[in-house]
């Protein structure tokens, strides 16, 4: 009887938490198609608010492309650098390794907004100010501490005997890394890639400061501008539609990759 009561309580609590977390998203989806005054959807249910979003300024397609470009580039930069850094910290011994690793993690303690002005000046010196590539580099900077940490513990969880066997067969360090180790740490790669994509896709403050041209704006900035386009009045309908458009790629990616995402975190928790 106690086991049945515990199971019932568990599912009741899990169900209640599920409803609690899903309710804002469900309500946003409902509000984006429901009729409301001062919106483009005033008579019956429909997609008038999405039409407002589609035709706003440079167009929804342009903002989606900008966000996708920045997010994918951030993932590529983060994976490339974190794989190299994580593998070096996990497998090589060199003077000051632990100190350098702690300094890398220390970036997490620096407030995000305090570095944006120096980075803005630095991007200007490099000719990358007001570019999507420069924005991706800045977003990569803030993903690297967590990414390097995840990749280090992922590589450390792989037995060294696998590498030693491959090297005995004639494989070099680069060959071992690309042909064997990357497949062994696949959950960690998924975790780092998904985490960096979600962070880059949803970031607002860095694109707002580093990119000033309207046609280079990412989706969060475009939605923030759209919501106050009519004499300062908030267009809640178009805003809700924008939130739905922003959330869908994140939900789809997480649903497809959640198993690997959880495995990546679990392997890190066990190693730590």
Image (cartoon, rainbow, N blue to C red):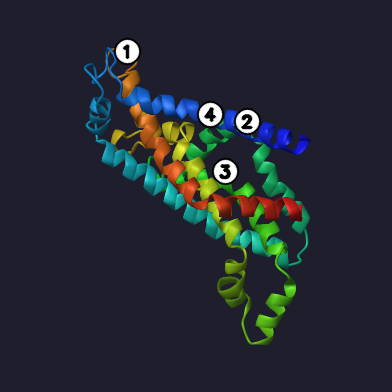
Farthest residue, direction front: 1
Instruction: Answer with mark 3 or mark 2, whichever residue precedes in sequence.
Output: 2
* Displayed quadrant of residue 8: top right
- Mark seen at residue 12: 2
x and y percent of residue 45 in the render?
A: 26, 23
SS assignment at label 3: helix
Task: In this rendered view, identify the residue nearer to me: 260 or 142.
Answer: 260
Q: What separation in Å lies between label 4 and label 2 (alpha carbons)? A: 11 Å
**Residue indicated by mark 1:** 233
Structural distance between the alpha carbons of marks 1 and 2? 42 Å
Mark toward the viewer: 4 or 2:
2
Q: Which mark is residue 142?
A: 3
Residue 94 position (above or below residue 228) = below
x and y, in percent, of residue 83 in the image: 59, 61
Question: Given this view, does label 3 or label 2 mark the residue nearer the observer?
Answer: 2
N-terminal label among 4 and 2: 2
Q: Which label lies toward us, 3 or 4?
A: 4
Question: Within 10 Å of the Cα at label 3, are there few (<14), some (14-19), or many (20+) other Cα atoms?
Answer: some
Q: Residues within 10 Å of mark 4 (few under 14, many from 20)?
A: few
| Quadrant of the drawing holding the N terminus | top right
Dot 2: what SS?
Answer: helix
| Circle 3 or circle 1, nearest the eye | 1
Residue 2 x/y as whole percent: 77, 35
Residue under pointer 4: 19
């Amino acid at each position: 009887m106690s086991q049945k009561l515990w199971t019932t309580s568990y599912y009741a609590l899990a169900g209640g938490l599920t409803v609690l977390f899903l309710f804002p998203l469900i309500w946003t989806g409902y509000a984006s198609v429901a009729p409301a005054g001062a919106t483009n959807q005033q008579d019956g249910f429909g997609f008038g608010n999405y039409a407002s979003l589609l035709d706003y300024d440079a167009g929804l397609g342009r903002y989606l492309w900008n966000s996708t470009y920045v997010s994918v580039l951030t993932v590529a930069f983060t994976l490339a650098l974190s794989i190299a850094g994580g593998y070096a910290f996990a497998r090589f011994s060199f003077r000051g390794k632990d100190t350098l690793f702690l300094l890398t993690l220390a970036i997490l303690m620096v407030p995000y907004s305090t570095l944006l002005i120096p980075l803005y000046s630095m991007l200007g010196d490099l000719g990358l100010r007001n570019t999507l590539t420069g924005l991706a580099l800045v977003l990569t900077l803030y993903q690297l501490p967590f990414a390097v940490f995840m990749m280090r513990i992922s590589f450390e969880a792989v037995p060294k005997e696998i590498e030693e066997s491959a090297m005995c067969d004639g494989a070099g360090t680069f060959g071992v890394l690309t042909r064997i180790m990357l497949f062994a740490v696949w959950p960690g790669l998924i975790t780092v890639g998904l985490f960096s994509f979600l962070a880059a896709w949803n970031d607002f403050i860095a694109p707002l400061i580093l990119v000033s041209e309207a046609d280079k704006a990412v989706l969060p900035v475009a939605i923030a501008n759209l919501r106050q386009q009519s004499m300062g009045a908030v267009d809640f309908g178009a805003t809700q539609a924008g939130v739905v458009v922003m959330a869908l790629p994140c939900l789809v990616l997480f649903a497809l990759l959640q198993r690997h995402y959880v495995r990546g975190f679990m392997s890190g928790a066990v190693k730590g």
